[in-house]
Amino acid sequence: MNFCSKCGSDNVHLHLEQESFVRYACQACDAIHYKNPLLVVGCVPVYQQQVLLCKRGIEPRKGYWNLPAGFMELNESVTAGALRELKEETGLSGQIIRLHSVYTARQKNQVMLHFLTRLENIDFSLNKESVAIQLFELNKIPWDKLAFKSNTFALKSYLKTLENPTNEVFISESDDKNG
Amino acid sequence: MNFCSKCGSDNVHLHLEQESFVRYACQACDAIHYKNPLLVVGCVPVYQQQVLLCKRGIEPRKGYWNLPAGFMELNESVTAGALRELKEETGLSGQIIRLHSVYTARQKNQVMLHFLTRLENIDFSLNKESVAIQLFELNKIPWDKLAFKSNTFALKSYLKTLENPTNEVFISESDDKNG
């Protein structure tokens, strides 16, 4: 933030409250501009014992496999956002089964919610964001080619639910910057 | 947003993408300022079959009963944020049992995560935010004096889990502006 978005002054300074709460404070008009984590919503899309992944066509992590996800928008619910991202990145519709995992990526200032989602069909379509889309058998997930640690967390947690069926939501407290 | 926080221009306009995605776009430097929902994290604090509520000392909804909650900060995890809010509003520590509910308040552009939390003791302390703090038996919850619909949702969902024990997370899709 270079300028105060309220009064236009360039007398804006980063202010650390209690050593960890980040705010920009305008010295001209006293406006405080809070910075808060962004919500990312996405799916763990399943179809006949397989998981669907998208190969990223854009940075960051271009060329790596990703679960469909993106920033939640205003005026939508968390599940609507997750299904919107699925549609945008794969062309597919799905049915939300339940909230599956919550991943805090502190260094990226993001909180990711992944919903277990049953795909209705697999007539996917490629696009700028997804240059390849593929169903993976659960013993063939490309662990070393996943885009983000949040993918690894969501997928490993999903495998756990198959071994020990549960409605539990898996919550990560990672602070890995590659979240 | 009156001024572009990147270049300081006042040539900033609200832009609705696809009729629902809200962005501020600067005509001078082309910066796009995204607006996204804010995460609120809080607790359903339980102690010996009772639930702890705080009477709000500040607006909005001053004088109404509320579950301890507040905006998630950068550099913390969702559970750390929920426990921080509990501490700030009651002076109490607790132990997170699990994620309990997710409430989308579309009109307020907020997503609330409430965690079921076991209180270690009830040596609470009042403060500016909480002018009264009280443990309520589950059949004596002040339903008509709750501050927000998200409180009602979290507490009614909690009663359901006592009738039918489950690890399920309750997800509301409310768009009530009084979320």
Image (cartoon, coloured by chain):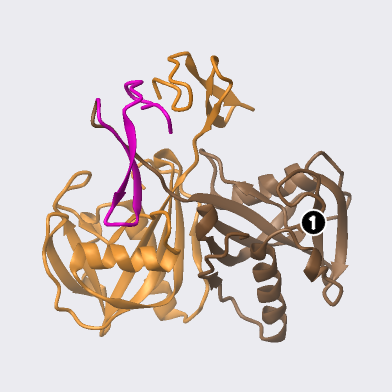
Chain colours: A brown, B orange
Magenta highlight on residue A91 = no
Q: At x 40% / y 69%, what residue is drawn? A: B115
Question: Which of the two residues, B21 or B166, is positioned nearer the viewer here?
Answer: B21
Left or right relative to A160: residue B168: left
| Residue B155 visible | no
**Image coords of residue B65 (percent x, y):** 20, 58
Question: From the image, which quarter does the C terminus of chain A lie in?
Answer: bottom right
Magenta highlight on residue A23 = yes
**Image coords of residue A116 (percent x, y):** 67, 64
Q: At x 68% / y 60%, what residue is drawn? A: A148
Q: How many marks?
A: 1
Question: From the image, which quarter does the N terminus of chain A lie in?
Answer: top left
Q: Amino acid at mark 1?
A: Tyr
Left or right relative to B97: residue A151: right
Taking A171 as reference, is B113 above or below it? above
Query: Which residue position is annotated with label 1?
Result: A64
**Image coords of residue A44 (percent x, y):** 71, 62
Question: Which of the two residues, B88 or B99, is positioned nearer the viewer here?
Answer: B88
Give the residues drawn in magenta, as a range.
Answer: A1-28
